Amino acid sequence: MSSRATPSRRRRRTRAATGALAAATLLTLAACSSSGDTDAAAETGDCPTAPVDVVVSVDQWGDLVSRLGGDCTHVTTVIASSSVDPHDYEPTPADAGKFVKADLVVVNGADYDPWASKLAASAAKGAAVLDAGQVVGAADGANPHLWYSPDDVARVSDAVTRELETLSPDAKDYLEQQRAALTKDLAPYTDLVAKLKTEAAGRTYGATEGVFDYMAQAVGLVDKTPAGFARAAANESDPSPADLKAFQDALAGHEIDVLIDNTQTEGSIPEQVRHTAEQAGVPVVEVTETVAPGASSFEDWQVSQLTELAKALGVDA
Ligand SMILES: [Zn+2]
């Protein structure tokens, strides 16, 4: 394990007002997706069979799973607030209770949410478990931010549909329609990724941490973050003064076209990097680990960040 002694970087709660708003919004969403009297649900919804209970560990996947399942699922998302850091999450007894009725548990895996896999094994015995990391071949130790990879989003979505079809074979047609509808809904996101790839590939970026790296790769950006700095960020430790200086020199010397800043981390190191970028006139694009407060859907969240990236790189989006 890495040393966690007094790092200058730590993940933070988002500002109170936006955090509360996000919690309220997500509670509303959660209430909608999991409400309804179970006995009547099969008759009132479009699902041709009784819905299955699905527990999703984190909201980065929760919205996608809800839409893939539609009326054929009751989805409960455990971490549905941007004021909670999924990396260091400790489940509550109430969280364990959410797993008890689950037919399917969806976890990110890649050691991002090990608590959820443990609860699935202990509290949801007999439930199917879909591990996104296993689906895409991301082992423990890999960059776990799989929802930032457009390819992984598609592959995990396909796997969720297959799993739901296994649990509800009579709902196959309905579930296929839901999968196709999601692809259509994601078009603004996939189109923007394609446009950036065409027009911005080869441009350079640096990042205060690696949350956005899969997306940066997907659009062909070249990572100029000093390797030692990136490694320290991934371990929640401090970079060496030499790595910090190398990063700041690269920004000041305009070797980096855009700085990607995860606003859900705080600390003097990311602040110094950001300050250097601002001083040098290098555009800063803000991204978040979890679904941004106020975003109405996964693609709404991603498109707004990608639009900012396009602007920063002078791509007409
Ligand atoms: Zn993270």
Image (cartoon, rainbow, N blue to C red):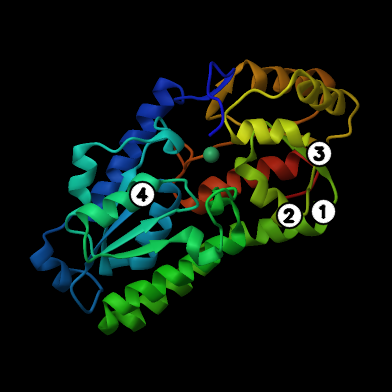
The residue to which callout 2 is attached is 219
| Vertical position of residue 162 compared to residue 135: above or below | below
Tell me: 312 left or right of 110.
right
Residue at 46% across, 26% down: 14
Judging from the image, what secondary structure is the residue with disc 4 in? strand
The residue to which callout 1 is attached is 201
Label 4 and label 2: CA atoms lie apart by: 27 Å
Label 3 and label 1: CA atoms lie apart by: 14 Å
Task: Examine the image and state in which quarter residue 169 appears.
Answer: bottom left
For this orientation, the residue located farthest to the left is 39
Label 4 and label 3: CA atoms lie apart by: 32 Å
Tell me: 15 left or right of 72.
right
Residue type, numbered disc 4: Ser
Is mark 4 in CB contact (under 8 Å) with mark 2? Answer: no
Is mark 3 in CB contact (under 8 Å) with mark 1? Answer: no
For this orientation, the residue located farthest to the right is 253
Q: CB of residue at label 2: within 8 Å of ligand 1?
A: no
Task: Examine the image and state in which quarter residue 188 appears.
Answer: bottom right
Of label 1 and label 4, which has the lower sequence position? 4
Q: Which label sits on residue 57?
A: 4
Q: CB of residue at label 3: within 8 Å of ligand 1?
A: no
The crowding category of the residue bearing disc 1, from other C-alpha atoms within 10 Å (few below 14, some 14 to 19, many at least 20), is some
Of label 1 and label 2, which has the lower sequence position? 1
| Vertical position of residue 37 compared to residue 289: above or below | below
Residue type, numbered disc 2: Val
Closer mark to the observer between disc 3 and disc 1:
3
Judging from the image, what secondary structure is the residue with disc 2 in? loop
The crowding category of the residue bearing disc 2, from other C-alpha atoms within 10 Å (few below 14, some 14 to 19, many at least 20), is many
Tell me: 3 left or right of 21.
right
